[in-house]
Image (spheres, grey):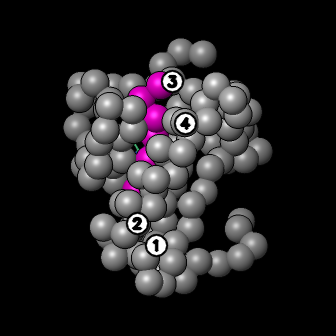
Amino acid sequence: MSETIFSKIIRKEIPADIVYETESVLAFRDINPQAPVHILVIPKLEIPMVSDIDGVEHASLLGKLFDAANLVAKNEGLAENGYRVVINCGKDGGQDVYHLHLHVLGGRKMNWPPG
Ligand code: AMP
């Protein structure tokens, strides 16, 4: 699958409001926030979607993604009241950008069930 706009953000070819970066993970504010805090946490490795994850091959990277999600949530002041971490997968899952990403949403009470 061809690269997405997130690859350009990783290479700093287009701007993004980056809040956290390591050699393997990048986190930046969503351009169309759905909550007072809405941050995307992505691997720098191009994994298109959840169904492309290999639990063994990507185990360490997945751990780093969740560590980053928890860290940015804490940095944004979400630790006390909680937050939502969402991964959309495929067309019916509501995925628009085919580069794996965790949505970290917080700063308001989330609704359930999701739409
Ligand atoms: P999804 O629908 O799960 O694939 O989510 C893709 C997300 O990427 C959406 O919430 C978009 O608002 C967000 N997005 C798309 N382009 C950008 C961008 N250039 N900078 C930041 N967020 C973006």
From the image, state whether disc 3 or disc 4 is nearer to you: 4
Q: What residue type is labelled 2?
A: Ala
Neighbour tally class for label 3: few under 14, some 14-19, many 20 plus, Cα within 10 Å: some
CA distance separating discs 1 and 3: 26 Å
Neighbour tally class for label 2: few under 14, some 14-19, many 20 plus, Cα within 10 Å: many
CA distance separating discs 1 and 4: 26 Å
- Mark carried by residue 60: 4
- Mark carried by residue 46: 3
Q: Are marks 3 and 4 in contact (CB under 8 Å)?
A: no
Q: What residue type is labelled 3?
A: Glu
- The answer to whether any part of residue 88 appears in the image is yes
Label 2, secondary structure: give it: helix
Residue at position x 34%, y 54% in the image: 29
Measuring from the top left, give residue 16's x and y in whole percent: 26, 43
Span highlighted in magenta in the image: 39-45
From the image, which quarter does the N terminus lie in? Answer: top right
Image quadrant assignment for residue 96: top right
Q: Is label 2 within 8 A of ligand 1 (CB to nearest ligand atom)? A: no
Q: Is 113 left, or right, of 9 in this rendering?
A: right
- Mark carried by residue 106: 1
Label 4, secondary structure: give it: helix
Measuring from the top left, give residue 64's x and y in whole percent: 47, 44
Q: Are marks 2 and 1 in contact (CB under 8 Å)?
A: yes
Residue at position x 33%, y 48% in the image: 28
Mark 4 and mark 2 lie on one chain; the one further toward the N terminus is 4
Mark 1 and mark 3 lie on one chain; the one further toward the N terminus is 3
Image quadrant assignment for residue 59: top right
Q: Do the residues labelled 2 and 3 touch (CB within 8 Å)?
A: no
Label 1, secondary structure: give it: strand
The relative height of residue 54 versus residue 33 in the rendered view (above or below) is above
From the image, state whether disc 2 or disc 1 is nearer to you: 2
Image quadrant assignment for residue 13: top left
